[in-house]
Image: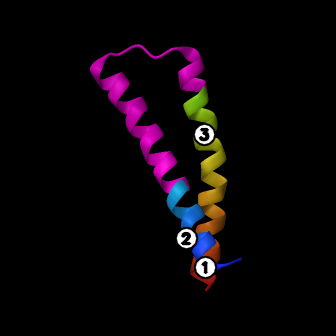
């Protein structure tokens, strides 16, 4: 894979995980109710982004 593509995928997955985590923590910390579908969507996004982050991190470290 191209180094630019790896860096882009790595950056996007890191941002997705960070944004989803901040949203969940902020909503819980301020007592804002999130619907089950919103929590599920954020969880699915994190579950998709985690393997992408792991794969790209390993590829970047090998280079």
Q: Residue at x 41, y 13 (%)?
A: 33
User: In the picture, residue 51 is in which quadrant?
Assistant: bottom right
Disc marking residue 59: none
Identified at 54% across, 24% down, the residue is 39
- Residue 33 in the figure: left or right of residue 50: left
The span from disc 3 to disc 2 (Cα, nearest Å) is: 19 Å
Residue 57 is one of the magenta-drawn residues: no
Q: CA distance from mark 1 to mark 2?
A: 6 Å
View extreme (bottom): residue: 63
Residue found at x 62% / y 62%: 54
Which residue lies most toward the left here?
30
- Give the residue at mark 2: 7
**Quadrant of residue 22 within the rendered picture:** top left
| Mark 1 vs 2: CB contact within 8 A | yes
Q: Quadrant of the C terminus?
A: bottom right
Residue displayed at 36% across by 23% down: 28
The mark that comes first in sequence, 3 or 2, is 2
Q: Secondary structure at mark 2?
A: helix
Which of the two discs, 3 and 1, sits closer to the camera?
Answer: 1
Estimate how packed mark 3 is, as few (under 14), some (14 to 19) or many (20 or more) residues with alpha carbons within 10 Å. some
Residue identified by numbered label 3: 45
Instruction: Classify residue 44 as left or right of residue 26.
Output: right
In the image, farthest residue toward the right: 1
Element assignment for label 1: helix
The residue that mark 1 highlights is 3
Which of marks 1 and 3 precedes in the sequence?
1
Q: Nearer the viewer, mark 3 or mark 2?
A: 2
Where residue 52 appears, as percent x and y from the top left, is: 65, 57
Q: Where residue 49 appears, x then y in whole percent?
A: 61, 49
Query: What is the magenta range?
Result: 13-40
């Amino acid at each position: 894979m191209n180094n630019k593509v790896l860096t882009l995928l790595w950056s996007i997955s890191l941002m997705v995980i960070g944004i989803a985590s901040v949203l969940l923590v902020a909503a819980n910390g301020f007592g804002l109710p999130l619907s089950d579908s919103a929590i599920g969507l954020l969880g699915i996004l994190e579950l998709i982004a985690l393997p992408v982050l792991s794969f790209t991190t390993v590829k970047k470290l090998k280079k």
